Image (spheres, grey):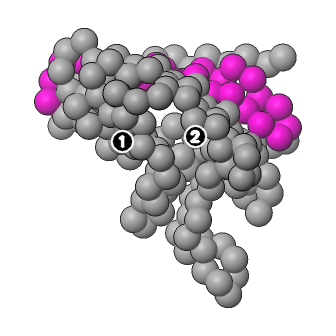
Amino acid sequence: MFTWVERPMCFSYKGIKMAVTRTILNNGSKTMLLHVYLESGGFEGELDKFVLADPELYDSVFTSRIIQPNMKLTLTQVWYSFNWFDGLISFDDVNPVPCWLLPRDASNYADFRYFGGLAHRFVDPQTAKGTDRTGKILLSTSGYAPLGSTGTMVLEIKKSLD
């Protein structure tokens, strides 16, 4: 089993300090498990369309057989625990496509395997491809700004060629 840990990604957005750490727990040829830890620096601001998974990013870090830029990522399961904030998972496009709401006061597990998972669903009927789809899975937050806001999530992502 191959395990990769990314250094904590500390960044500033309009002077706001936040930390996001992504760790690949398992990366097979058809699925991957991604762990994400979030920690707010206590300043006003939210995560806005933060990239959780990107086929091109992981393709450049690993070998081309793990994830390729032309692979479609499908969310099949998500486990999460957020301390006083909500999350929204979406797929990247000119206007990001909302996928699933992760409320703080609800069940912390969702299983989409029964119907094949959640994937980017806006496609051009002529080409059967999204117009500006990048394959990225994004996270936006609401209520994340206060000091002490932390969260963790595990995503199971299915990889397939278009």
For residue 137, above or below residue 44? below
Q: Quadrant of residue 17?
A: top left
* Residue depicted at x 49% and y 52%: 99
Q: Secondary structure at mark 1?
A: strand
Is residue 28 a member of the stretch shown in magenta? yes
Mark 2 vs mark 1: give the one in front: 1
Magenta stretch, residue numbers: 20-44
Q: Is residue 125 visible?
A: yes
Question: Depth check: 82 or 14 in front?
Answer: 82
- Label 2: how many residues lie within 10 Å, few (<14), some (14-19) or many (20+)? some
* Residue depicted at x 62% and y 55%: 119
Question: Depth check: 137 or 85 in front?
Answer: 85
Q: Is residue 115 left or right of residue 40?
A: right
For residue 124, above or below residue 10? below
Q: Which residue is mark 2?
A: 53
* Mark nearer the N terminus (2 vs 1): 2
Residue 86 is situated, as x and y percent measured from the top left of the image, at: 33, 34
Residue 6 is situated, as x and y percent measured from the top left of the image, at: 56, 20
Q: Is residue 13 left or right of residue 20?
A: left
Q: Quadrant of residue 57?
A: top right
Is residue 42 a member of the stretch shown in magenta? yes
Q: Which residue is mark 1?
A: 140
* Residue depicted at x 19% and y 34%: 45
For residue 17, above or below residue 156? above
Q: Is residue 133 left or right of residue 90?
A: right
> What amino acid is at disc 2?
Ala
> What amino acid is at disc 1?
Ser
* Residue depicted at x 44% and y 55%: 98
Residue 130 is situated, as x and y percent measured from the top left of the image, at: 59, 71
